[in-house]
Amino acid sequence: MAANVNIEHVRWALEELSDEREQVRLWLSDGSAGKEVSSFVEAQCILFDDSGLGYALETNSTGLGEQIDSQLVLIGALLRRIDSGRSPQDIIADPLMSRVRAAAAETLQALQT
């Protein structure tokens, strides 16, 4: 695996992007009483920016393999098609998010094998 990809960040983001219940818990949280908070945009940033994955995909240097790279490119393409300016509820309910969740779950499974 390429040293410039933080695989733990990739896994965290994929876990969030693959789980509708987790999205509801985090994206609709108001942060009161120490509750965790996240967002659609934050999940994308963790996956592609904070992890170094975006650059590694651009330079074909993820070290994760062709199949996983293809899935990650698909996830990125789907995420870009979702309007992030809407409410979290609308984003979670977007039919494209169902595809994102499925692709993220498949990719997460492939990473664990």
Image: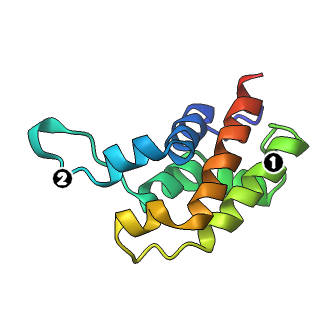
Apparent side of residue 4 relative to residue 68 in the rendered image (left or right):
left
Q: Residue at 87% of width from left, 43% of height from top?
A: 67
Q: Residue at 62% of width from left, 74% of height from top?
A: 81
The answer to whether mark 1 and mark 2 are in CB contact below 8 A is: no
Residue 110, x across and y down, in percent: 77, 32
Residue 23, x across and y down, in percent: 41, 48
> In terms of secondary structure, where does tag 2 sit?
loop
Find residue 58 and name its label. Answer: none
Is residue 56 or residue 99 the one in the foreground? 99
Foreground mark, 1 or 2, reads: 2
Residue 10, x across and y down, in percent: 60, 40
Residue behind mark 1: 69
Q: Residue at 48% of width from left, 52% of height from top?
A: 43
82 to 103, vertically: above or below:
below
Residue behind mark 2: 30
Report the number of discs.
Answer: 2
Apparent side of residue 85 relative to residue 28 in the rendered image (left or right):
right
Residue 13, x across and y down, in percent: 53, 43
Which of the two labelled residues, at mark 1 and mark 2, occupies the earlier sequence position? Answer: 2
> In terms of secondary structure, where does tag 1 sit?
helix
Q: In which quadrant will I find the C terminus?
A: top right
Residue type for callout 2: Asp
Residue type for callout 1: Asp
Is residue 19 or residue 42 the one in the foreground? 19
